[in-house]
Amino acid sequence: MDDEGVGDTPATALRRGWTTGACATAATKAAWQALLTGTFPDPVEIVLPRGQRPAFALAITEAGEGFARAGIVKDAGDDPDVTHGALIVSTVRRDAPGRGVTFVAGEGVGTVTKPGLPLPPGEPAINPVPRRLMREVVADVAAAHGASADVVIELSVPDGVRIAEQTWNGRLGIVGGLSILGTTGVVIPYSCSAWITSIRQGVDVARAAGHPHVAGCTGSTSEAAVQAALGLPDSAMLDMGDFVGALLKHLRRRPVPRLTIGGGFAKLSKLAIGHLDLHSGRSQVDLDHLARTLAALGADGDVVTRARGANTALEVLEIAGPLAGALADAVARDAQRVASAVLADAPVAVDIIVVDRTGAIRGMCPRSNR
């Protein structure tokens, strides 16, 4: 995680959970075995990419003419995951010999509609690693019972359409529900890996769409201000959050001609002094630095002293008075310098927009963008 500019967060006391992909794999194994034998294994054990062997209790089972269905309630552990508690259902049917494994998006599972994701448009939003895991369990169960591994797997998530509204799927061009995700099968609490994956996918979708200009913002207020100022389409807006380092490092590998970074004054003041993870738990505003910047801008001693003793960065901006715009521009210039250094020789032009809590633009670099 450090390679992405994300600090480590102690998670030793937190309970790990399982990805939607791991749940889908276990449900598929149970349904396929029931289709072949008439009996659902409960609990059902699978092997994850790193060798873990979790066992899952089945929440629902159903069998009928030519199909079997099993469902597992996702347990995300102590991670604040919007899919925690969702029911992941796999319905398995036999297919013609030689067809292999076919994946179908059922209720609440999305479909890819834009290029740039690991799956082509038109495919169910079931990521490559979960697909591989499901193919493996289908093959293993088929071999154990002397059957051919030719099946149709339909994954569904009741209420998945509603849950997906709390994710970035719509912006990524995934419509109709959730994605079935997971590279390790394990949800590490507060690891932020899903967010970083979404940032990367957002860049890839924007590149595939041919966008010459993308924007990454720290939150909804700055995003609304930046999008209104620049007139960018939704698919060019990247859900950067606090992970500016992850965005910059991915753009260094997969450049887009122009990047705008937008954010609140406090967040961008941290980027301005070199922090690439802007989360309050992993980096702090340097009030002394802001006070020194005000002094360099010509603020009198009383203003500098009050700024140094302020409670927050926004209070410093208020204390700055008529120098507030110059201070915000200085933060933007320093933030641009840091971002450009991370991008190194990548052909990406960077500009910065600083907003306040109301969404008003207070500073930018270069100034000519106003």
Image (tube, grey):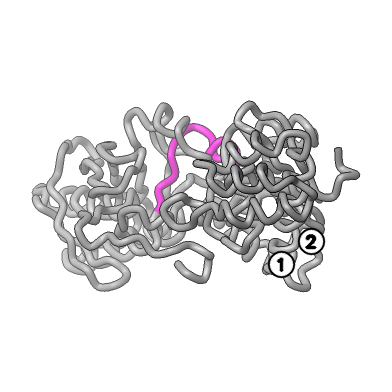
Secondary structure found at label 2: loop
Residue 22 location (% of width, % of height) = 29, 55
What's the distance in space between the residues labelled 2 and 1, CA to CA?
Answer: 7 Å
Residue identified by numbered label 2: 348
Name the side, left or right, on which 14 lies relative to 132: left
Rendering coords of residue 81 (x, y %):
34, 43
Q: Which residue shows up at 35% across the image and 57% down it?
A: 150
Q: Is residue 8 visible?
A: yes
Q: Is residue 81 magenta?
A: no
Q: Viewer-proximal residue, 309 or 351?
A: 309
Up the image or down, 363 lies above or below 293; here it is above
Q: Residue at horizontal 68%, vertical 68%?
A: 342
Q: Is residue 279 left or right of residue 158?
A: right
SS label for mark 1: helix
Image quadrant where residue 172 sits: top right
Identify whether 277 is placed above or below 153.
below
**Residue 101 visible in this rendered orientation of the protein:** no
Residue type indicated by callout 2: Val
- The span shown in magenta is 169-181
Nearer to us in this view, 194 or 2: 2
Q: Quadrant of the N terminus?
A: bottom left
Amino acid marked by disc 1: Leu
For residue 343, the mark is 1
Q: Residues within 10 Å of mark 2 (few under 14, many from 20)?
A: many
Instruction: Give the camera-side residue of 222 and 163.
Output: 222
Q: Is residue 261 above or below residue 176?
A: below
Residue closest to the eye, 195 or 49: 195
Q: Are marks 2 and 1 in contact (CB under 8 Å)?
A: yes
Q: Residue at x 33, y 43 (%)?
A: 80
* Position of residue 185 measured from the top left corner of the image (x, y, whole percent): 31, 59
242 left or right of 361 in image:
left
* Corner quadrant of residue 234: top right
